Image: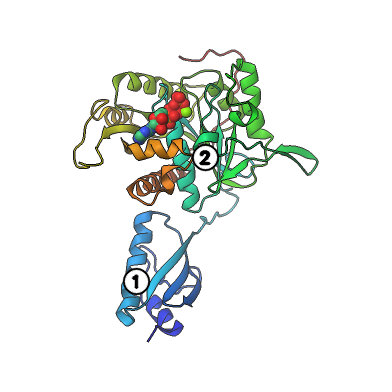
Amino acid sequence: MSITKKEILDLLGSIQIPSDNKTLIHSDVLKDVSINGSVVELKLSIKNPTLQFRKKIELQVTQAIQKTSSKNTVKIDFVIQEKQVSGNQKPHQAMNGIKNIIAIASGKGGVGKSTVSSNLATALSIIGKKVGLIDADIYGPSMPLMFDVEKEKPVVSNINGKSLIEPIVSYGVKILSIGFFSNPSDAIVWRGPMASKALNQMIHQANWGDLDYLIIDLPPGTGDIHLTLVQSIPLTGAIIVTTPQPISLIDAKKAAAMFNMKNINVPIIGMVENMSWFSPEDNPKKKYYIFGKDGGKNLSKDLNIPLLYRFPLLESVRESSDVGRPATLQKNKNAEMFLKFAEKVTEKTNERNKNISKTKRVKITHTKGCS
Ligand SMILES: Nc1ncnc2c1ncn2[C@@H]1O[C@H](COP(=O)(O)OP(=O)(O)OP(=O)(O)O)[C@@H](O)[C@H]1O
Ligand SMILES: [Mg+2]
């Protein structure tokens, strides 16, 4: 016989939430219980957003329910509780309606900024965040291709008397790219001021609505677009992408130095080592360190920046970008890898917001880039 609702509630009442004095039946936590055929469906509101925590709860609930009725399976929809804000303290907001703005930078070209940006945005959306993505690469916008929206053209809406560009939505991510405003077959030769104007429009004259994360995929280098960005918005932080190759590390160091400049002062949330090794599909245990070994890991230690993730060079990651479906959407280990990475980014962003005050917009009258 299938389990009854009463039995489920009794079982949930016996499961203690780790590091909390509540059980799963507490009204702050249990938001819904239903039985759909043999599937027990629960909606739980939790404070700890980590995958490890959710897996632990899922395992405890499944074991408890299957002890009573082995025929039942369990499906849990986790909702992450917003932190309670006390007194006159306001929740961290980078910009009106946008909680966190994160720039993905590298220094050297072709190291995987766009691959990391597209998969991070998709993974954050999968774990329940509201996500926007700006492709600020004036030299070679990649998001229209990576999200299979090359033929889309954003429309302009009138919202409360303001004309705002509507981002294109793909796989749950709101996207704007310089590529939407130009013909893909035209070479895009933007002069600095034109590119800066386009970036400013994508940031300030778009209907982003409420977002948990706005991810900005930057072009390589440390030039005009980077300076426009830090002058246009208070970035929550930057993530630096590098391969383990010495030439990439030198440029990653320059990018880090730019964000650390006294008058820029954008916190670096972490570093990503991409293309860390190659493992052939027919011999996945073998690792070939094509671009050198541990370069990004060592640089992150030297610069005292957390190493967020090391992504191997995988044919399927490249393929999925080329067919316009981020690897995070695949049903394999790649997806797990990007979801773990997204969890790490949320964890480090929350730490940053707790420990460092809001970044100030940079006011620069005459500045040179540092490339
Ligand atoms: N981990 C990976 N495994 C396999 N291929 C990858 C990986 N990361 C990136 N690539 C591939 O490497 C190429 C460069 O990646 P990507 O476009 O993300 O780099 P980028 O830093 O954004 O480049 P640019 O500086 O030109 O903007 C792409 O073809 C991408 O599919
Ligand atoms: Mg790119």
Query: Badge 1, how many Cα within 10 Å: few under 14, some, many 20+?
Result: some
Q: Where residue 21 appears, x then y in whole percent?
A: 39, 68
Instruction: Using the rendered image of the protein, determine whether residue 295 is visible from the camera's viewpoint.
Output: yes
- At label 2, which amino acid type do we have? Phe
Identity, as a three-letter code, of the amino acid under mark 1: Thr
Residue 272 visible to the viewer:
no
Quadrant location of residue 293?
Answer: top left
Q: Which residue is mark 2?
A: 147
Viewer-side residue, 63 vs 234: 63
The residue under the point 65% across, 46% down is 209
**Residue at image coords 31%, 79%:** 70
Which residue in the rendered view is the most extreme toward the bottom? 1
Q: Are marks 2 and 1 in contact (CB under 8 Å)?
A: no
Q: Toward the viewer: 334 or 67?
A: 334
Quarter of the image with the N terminus in it: bottom left
Tell me the colour scheme of the image. Answer: rainbow
Residue furthest to the right in view is 161
Closer to us: 266 or 98? 98
Residue 62 is labelled as 1
* Residue 277 rendering spot, x and y as whole percentages: 26, 33
Q: Which residue is rendered at x = 62% and y = 26% of the image?
A: 183
Q: Residue 47 location, x and y as percent?
A: 45, 59
Indicate left or right for 236 with 281 as reference. Answer: right
Mark 2 and mark 1 lie on one chain; the one further toward the N terminus is: 1
Q: In this rendering, would 218 be left or right of 333?
A: right
Secondary structure at numbered mark 1: helix
Q: Relative to 289, is 131 above or below?
A: below
Residue depicted at x 60% and y 28%: 178
